[in-house]
Image (spheres, rainbow, N blue to C red):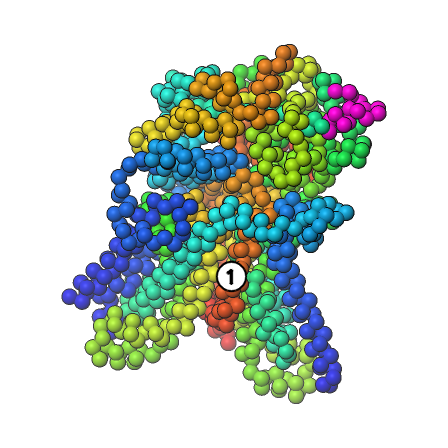
Amino acid sequence: MAVKRRFANAAIFILLLILALLVLAPILVVLMNSFKGQFFISDAPFKLPTLTETADGPATFVGFKNYLSGIEKAGFLSAFGYSLFITVFSVGAIILFTAMTAWYIIRSKGKFSGALYYLFVFSMIVPFQMVMFPMSKVANMLHLDNPVGIIVIYLGFGAGLSVFMFSGFVKSIPLEIEEAAMIDGCNPIQTFFLVVFPILRPTAITVAILNAMWIWNDYLLPYLVIGNKYRTIPIAVQYLQGGYGSRDMGALMAVLVLSIIPIIIFYLICQKYIIKGVVAGAVKG
Amino acid sequence: MKKLLALILAIAMLATLAACGSTGGTGTPSTPAADPSGTTSGDQATQPAAGGELYYLNFKPEIAPVYDEIAAAYEAETGVKLHVVTAASGTYEQTLKSEIAKADAPVLFQINGPKGYANWKDYCADLSGTELYQHLTDKGLAITDGDKVVGIPYVVEGYGIIYNNAIMEKYFALDGAKAKSMDEIRSFQKLKEVVEDMTAKKDQLGIKGVFASTSLKPGEDWRWQTHLANLPVHYEFEANNVDLSTDATKEITFQYGDNYKNIFDLYLNNSTVDPKLLGSKQVADSMAEFALGQCAMVQNGNWAWSQIAEVEGNTVKEEDIKFMPIYIGVDGEESQGICVGTENFFAINSQAPAEKQKLAADFIYWLYSSDTGKDFVTNKLGFIAPFDTFAEDERPTDPLAREVSAWMSKEGVSSVPWSAFLVFPSQTFKDDFGAALLQYAQGTKTWDDVKTLVVDEWKAESNL
Amino acid sequence: MSKTLRKYFAFFALPTFIAFAISFLIPFVMGVYLSFTEFTTVTNTQWVGLANYVKAFTGSRDFLNALWFTVKFTVVSVITINLLSFALAMLLTRAMKGTNLFRTVFFMPNLIGGIVLGYIWQIIINGFLLRFGVDITFSAKYGFWGLVVLMNWQLVGYMMVIYIAGIQNISGELTEAAAIDGASGWQSLIHVTIPNVMPSITICTFLTLTNSFKLFDQNFALTGGAPAKETQMLALDIYNTFYGRVGFEGVGQAKATVFFIVVGVIAFTQLMLTRRKEVEN
């Protein structure tokens, strides 16, 4: 029995190893191609770069040339800055404001609060295409079409899921704790920040991760709202496809690699929270 | 009291958000991203319009890098900030649409002819009073509406088949060559004979194929669905004496469709690339193949010079780059020249504030009249400018531009005007035609289907 | 407490509400209204009744084609993603070395954005098809299966993590009891594991369903609809109708409204089904 089991485990291990390599392969292929000359990519994406001339043709290894041209053509550094700025501050705003809103909705128990809650939930199922045109117009009229203004837009769009998740958690907090704080003379603002908000921490992490993943990778919303002036990373990648003269495959490969690296680093550092957050988000969402 | 405090806090919070919102707009893509200066100093937004800012929505992706330099030079000279946005290939109309609806809309944009004007009628200011228009050499080239001048052409361009003379000479020297010089190739029949013989001898010639790949990736197919299609449509209108300013252009029979097929098949079957792979090929690939000496010919215009010149490992010599007309097998094509004209007309947004419109008019005049501007136009943009502010020696000196001039003044041939493609019904028509051409190349659509689509869609799109 | 709190509406709920109104509520109402009008900008509209809806379905076959393509794609990806991720979850919940590392690797693609993913896979798929002398634009089949592979690659790890959590929640006693009763691995899977991870299955089905149905970025980057719009999904068709041509904004908005209704019906049905199950339990 034990031998059989060990044998099965070994077989499964090998199977998983192959699968893991398959999962990583596309990223590795792109990494490899990012070091090849731009005209040697589409025709032979699975060939390793060559250092010297071969029977097939000239040397294809170009060092970091693609990275330099990609960074320059796509404006990658500023794109990275915009992406980081928008993601960090939007997520911050979402956590602060939606946590307050969720607590208010659950604890105030008014009819209006109830209606508000259902509006937020309703917004989760509406596809973006339904509102994209009027929304970009409204954003423009209110001068929100810049990296700071878009934070307001993200707060509005992120509100549905975030309020929903915070509300679910608030319901599970025993009322006595807050009542005790009130009796001690705290006003609602103090109660919220001193007592409730710290308790919400685990949910706040989940909300932060889900929203960060969405905002960092979002393409259409920032493209429509601020895209022609400020390019975030996904917009910069798309821009390399034809907005800047001809499409340079080498630069594209390099920018793809560059846009993946920060995500992988972030993931490896916060892995635990991310996986937990996703599970928690899914179960509640 | 507490309630009041809460309200004030909330308002303060919103106010900071709103204040940030109204100031961020002065940034440009080149300023470092997270620069929060705009969020702290609210008075930045109201800085005096010392030079002002001008928003230009550029149509030509291949000149986007040059415009970065032009913007810097213009700001240095005049203090006016030129904000240039370039739409990706094939997306100009949709970018213009989303941009023009904005508060900070493009002031300077372009229309591609009468059809473009019909779409943007409400936004095209009368340019008859502008200085640039006064200098337009041939006033007939402008787009007009009654007494109003609504579009000023800013470049004259020519296209045909670009060939590498070194490879052709090599072929002519071979035993049994079907021709001994380019002068003999004056018709489709002869071209076909030569091209097919070259394909048979491609190893001797050291090429992968005679023609560069026929780029049919969506957005990269304009050389076929617009430029090449200009010829049969032009001949059709000419044969039927159609007045291009009338509704008679709303329907075509594509009677020269088989001529189109002649040349298109020749491109596909004698190419560097298997026709089944054309769906991911782009113009840049074709130009690189030409520059690297992998093919002898490529259909394109003089604007492609920069794309040939910038390819690393470029083997084709400047003096070997020549133009020949696109022969499609119509009677009397011996006297056909290359295609010369324009689809690029400056337009100024009539709904923009008057001072902005003035800035736009000033900028285009500067570009085509000042020494700095003219230097950019001639040497960096490589434009053949249709204005009398340019002297004879201020023409672009790249080989393709010189060839265009040479063909225009050549005895015994007449250029084909671009007039037909100014009446192509819409971008949707072009896109659908391009998609059908790709399917034809891949063998999943018959030529008859393509023809039917052209005829039906032309009519449908014209009558929308 | 609720009474005191209500006075603090402006502090607690107003900021979110204003942002929500700006980016969602007002645009949503405008969107519904605009779908009955002809407009190029939202300030200049003309009431046309249902004409846009009629045009959406009859103007060209694009919308119906996109709808059908989207449905096919959604069905196939929901099935493949859930089967694969469940199988992986089963393997990774065995007592075995290295499961954590595998979990890390399998989950990672989920973090990469749709646009980036689309271009990564375009290279891979075209490189593979090159051996057969074609590329992804050759046939809608390639685009379809390309998208399915891409979605699997992206979402299997995500769903796997949810299934793992579900499986780990099953108490050891249950499986042990089954083993003692002499149930084979297969029997215990069907009679013990699956019924107990039903909540996870519901969640994963819902997530894959909505993600696939509303897919835009991946579709946009991988094929862009080629060949000839045959691989265009609903979201992309709506986008192209809106921004692709002048004069079709109303039609685009009408298509978007139809899209919203379809998504709403799916979500509502799912909700009802789950509710009923929960009540039964």
Which residue does the image show at 38% across and 51% down from the upper left? Answer: A147
Give the prevailing secondary structure in the magenta stretch: loop
Q: Is residue A94 above or below residue A246?
A: below
Task: Determine the residue positioned at 51% across, 19% down.
Answer: B393
From what the image shows, is residue A245 above or below residue C280? above
State the extent of the magenta-drawn residues as a range.
B167-181
Left or right: A223 in relation to B250? left
Using residue A197 as the reference point, say whether residue B234 is left or right of it. Answer: right
- Residue A158 visible here: no
Residue at (24% x, 57% y) in the render: B11
Please indicate, yes or no, whether residue A143 appears anywhere in the rendered image. yes
Where residue B193 sits, quadrant-wise, is top right
The answer to which image quadrant residue B175 occupies is top right
Residue A71 point in image, percent of width and height: 51, 49
Which residue is label 1 attached to? Answer: A263
Please give the name of the residue rendered at 64% of the width and 11% of the height, measured from the top-left corner: B412
Q: Residue placed farthest to the top in the image? A: B412
Q: Position of residue B144 (x, y in %)?
A: 43, 20
Membership of A249 in magenta stretch = no
| Amino acid tagged 1 | Ile
Of residues C29 and C57, the one drawn nearer to the viewer in this rendering: C29
Q: Position of residue B267 (x, y in %)?
A: 70, 31
**Looking at the figure, which quarter contains the N terminus of chain C?**
bottom left
Comparing B312 with C256, the one in front is B312
Chain bearing tag 1 is: A
> Against C106, is C135 above or below?
above
Residue C213, image x, y percentages: 54, 55
Q: Please, what secondary structure does the residue beneath circle 1 have?
A: helix
Task: Kindly give the residue lying farthest to the bottom in the view shown.
Answer: C180
Quick check: B228 left or right of B31?
right
Front one among A129 and B311: B311
